[in-house]
Amino acid sequence: MPNILLTCAGRRNYLVHYFRQALGGQGEVVAVDSNPTAPALQMADRAFVVPTINHPDYFDQLLEICRQHRVGLLLSLNDLELPLLASQRDRFMAVGTLPVVSSPEVIDLCFDTLAATEFLEQAGLKVPRTFVTLEDVRGALGRDELGLPLVIKPRWGSASIGIEYPESLEELEMAWNLSKLRLLRTCLAGPSAANLEQCMLVQERLAGVEYGLDVVNDLEGRHVGTFVKQKKAMRAGETDQAVTVVSPLLQGVGRKIGEALQHVGNLDCDVFVEGDQCRVLEMNPRFGGGYPFSHAAGANLPAALLAWAQGKTPDPQWLTLRPVVASAKCDHLVEVRDYARSETSVFVKNMLTGRKNQFGAAVEAV
């Protein structure tokens, strides 16, 4: 079994647990993050504190970890890291590590909401009406082709950063201008700076029932299945409560997307259904916050990825959901290992200066 590396592991300790179970003691889960107190680091077999993704040494350090610990499979859990990792794919392949990441073209398309809506329409799918200028929005409102409330969001977005829901024309104008200013103070400033005139979008606010899809392709980009969950509650831009459903309609939507996009691994996708109309809202080519609801209902994508990486055929049960399984996320504490043995003043200084941090024996510096 290959060892697994999860980058930008953050709070996704459940993915560490899923991959450890899939390995069955025949391999290790290695996790890295720039924050030594990240919950996922505390559960990994090996954990390393690394620089942030934009640091010039970041990928060199990941490569060294892959060499030293015989990492066979690498997955990023961060939207902003995906395009960087896709561009570094050949370097990892050269040391025997397979990044589970789509092509740079697929990553860029999914990250750009405007490009994604155009792609989905070309694939024969419906999307929310999308505008890049306030003038176009005012015109559509004046012709009664569009109604309030609306949604303002970054064109290149992540999680719920910068999203506003104006309910009047006055609020729309204010939120549009304020959102543009605030966006440049977020982690999305870099991508947005490439086109400040079109870095924000306005979309119609969709009615109906919201569903989350895990659109699953194999490592060659071939569609193998779609897991469907009805969202019951959201928290900080992530699914907080959901129930699995069997829906030929939505599984067909997932198949269309998977076959047209040819992404690698999981694609986290949001869809609104009103009557027999489906509208696709977002696509994120990675494990998303909705995957645990699929896993709780019998899916096992980590095991399937390991099988594909070894040239094996996954157990069909790993790509099948039990219907009507309702699940809810909850908070629980994870002890930060060896914190008591670290010097708090040194820890704080290292975090502030960006130096590499050795954080006890369990969480290592590179």
Image (cartoon, grey):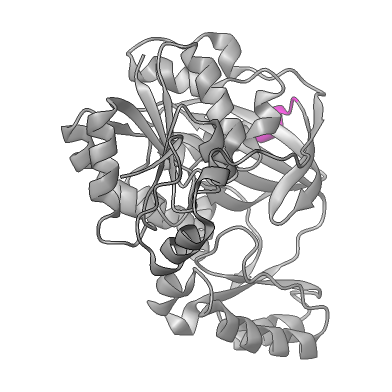
Q: Percent x, y for residue 120?
A: 53, 51
Q: Percent x, y for residue 249?
A: 70, 33
Report the residue at 65% width, 25% height from top: 295
Instruction: Give left or right: position of 66 versus 15.
Output: left
Residue 47 sits in which quadrant? top left
User: What stretch of residues is rendered in magenta?
Assistant: 246-250
Q: Is residue 260 above or below residue 292?
A: below
Q: Percent x, y for residue 199?
A: 50, 76
Residues 223 and 56: in front is 56
Residues 261 and 70: in front is 70
Q: Main secondary structure of the magenta part?
A: helix
Quarter of the N terminus within the rendering:
top left
Q: Percent x, y for residue 73?
A: 35, 28
Residues 230 and 350: in front is 350
Residues 172 and 58: in front is 58
Report the residue at 24% width, 41% height from top: 63
Is residue 249 rendered magenta in the image? yes
Is residue 343 rendered magenta in the image? no
Visible residue check, residue 225: no
Residue 227 sits in which quadrant? top right
Instruction: Give left or right: position of 8 versus 135.
Output: left
